[in-house]
């Protein structure tokens, strides 16, 4: 398959006054990818998208969209982009249908009312066409933001935390919509701080932390490259230092009341855990084994947890 570069970020450094938000970031997104920017709050994800969108001017480096420099030709690059901002201030006193019409017109795309309905139908919003945007539920507003983002039929769709603050059902619905946009041949870049979202949707992921990309690859490749062992999970109260000292244990931590132990030999470690628990008169419940995930990758690369900072 021939490769076509849709987004190139070249050595971008971005700052807000004295604060460096991005530090020499480079990445490349190919046509047809769902590409994820995964990192905790404050990592620089929104700033990176803003540089691609032409909404933030990098201090150094440049961003290209479809081979065209965003800074040199902002109008031409914006026309290729559909943008769902992290907080879309959907104008308060417009109805759903009016909003779609207005946003498309900003891109000089003038939709007929049939076209507006067809667009709303894809996002399950037809019945809401005459409802004020501010009266929609959270999930409906997120879907409307996405409908608005693709009103100009863009090749590339940039989604900033598309599912944050959504309940699990609305989140799944949004995942389906993202997959649908991808199936139509669009290139998708999304940000998230949820590793399961990145794993579920993204072919490749850039892990971003403190303004730097610390790794970039397919989720499975990231996990494989770090040679992470399976994780043994159990609900038990044990001193971490004693768990870490057990044979075969390469790491141990608590997520809430659940102990997670990385081990090359789960059976041996489980036996050792039972012995330790018996000695300390503690009971072990809910034992499970899980394969390593992007959360473990982030922890390994940064020494910190992705989830607990959000
Ligand atoms: N408009 C702004 N003014 C000052 N600092 C900002 C602004 N926007 C973001 N920042 C800071 O830049 C860093 C990166 O922020 P951001 O790109 O929003 O991260 P993320 O989207 O990953 O949460 C953070 O330290 C944040 O506080
Ligand atoms: Mg953000």
Image (spheres, helix red, strand yellow):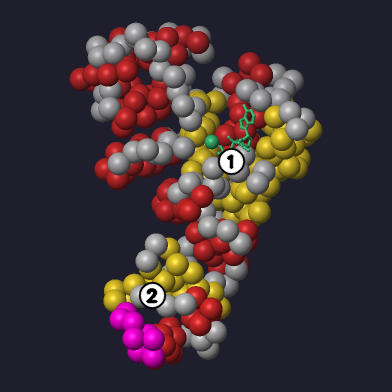
Answer above or below: position of 182 versus 198.
above
Answer above or below: position of 222 versus 242.
above
Q: Quadrant of ligand 1?
A: top right
Question: Is 280 covered by the magenta stretch?
Answer: yes
Question: Is 304 covered by the magenta stretch?
Answer: no
Q: Position of residue 138 (x, y in %)?
A: 32, 30
Please indicate whether residue 167 sits to the left or right of residue 46 in the image. left
Earlier residue among tags 2 and 1 = 1
Give the quarter of the image for residue 129: top left
Q: Which residues are magenta?
A: 277-284
Residue 176 shows in this picture: no
Residue 49 shows in this picture: yes
Report the label total.
2
Residue indicated by mark 2 = 237
Closest to the camera, between mark 2 and mark 1, is 2
Answer above or below: position of 54 versus 177.
above
Which residue is rendered at x = 47% and y = 53% of the image? 307
Which residue is rendered at x = 50% and y = 10% of the image? 106
Which residue is rendered at x = 62% and y = 53% of the image? 216
Residue indicated by mark 1 = 42
Q: Secondary structure at mark 1?
A: loop
Would you say the beta carbon of the disc 1 residue lies within 8 angstroms of ligand 1? yes
């Amino acid at each position: 398959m021939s490769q076509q570069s849709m987004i190139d970020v070249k050595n971008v450094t971005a700052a807000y006054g004295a604060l460096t938000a991005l530090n020499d970031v480079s990445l490349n997104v190919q046509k047809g990818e769902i590409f994820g920017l995964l990192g905790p709050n404050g990592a620089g994800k929104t700033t990176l998208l803003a540089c691609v969108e032409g909404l933030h001017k990098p201090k150094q480096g440049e961003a290209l969209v479809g081979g065209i420099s965003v800074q040199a030709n902002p109008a031409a690059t914006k026309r290729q982009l559909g943008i769902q901002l992290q907080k879309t201030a959907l104008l308060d006193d417009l109805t759903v249908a009016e909003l779609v019409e207005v946003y498309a017109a900003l891109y000089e795309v003038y939709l007929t009312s049939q076209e507006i309905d067809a667009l709303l139908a894809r996002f399950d919003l037809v019945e809401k066409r005459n409802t004020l945007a501010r009266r929609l539920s959270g999930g409906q507003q997120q879907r409307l933001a996405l409908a608005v983002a693709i009103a100009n039929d863009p090749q590339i769709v940039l989604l900033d935390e598309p599912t944050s603050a959504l309940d699990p059902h609305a989140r799944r619905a949004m995942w389906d919509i993202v997959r649908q946009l991808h199936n139509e041949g669009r290139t998708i870049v999304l940000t998230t701080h949820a590793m399961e979202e990145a794993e579920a949707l993204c072919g490749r992921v850039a892990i971003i932390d403190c303004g730097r990309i610390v790794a970039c690859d397919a989720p499975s490749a990231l996990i494989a490259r770090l040679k992470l062992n399976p994780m043994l999970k159990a609900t038990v109260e044990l001193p971490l230092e004693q768990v870490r000292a057990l044979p075969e244990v390469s790491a141990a931590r608590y997520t809430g009341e659940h102990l997670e132990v990385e081990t090359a030999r789960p059976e041996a470690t489980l036996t050792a855990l039972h012995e330790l628990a018996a000695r300390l008169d503690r009971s072990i419940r809910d034992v499970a084994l899980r394969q390593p995930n992007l959360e473990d990758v982030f922890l390994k690369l940064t020494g910190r947890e992705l989830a607990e900072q959000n």
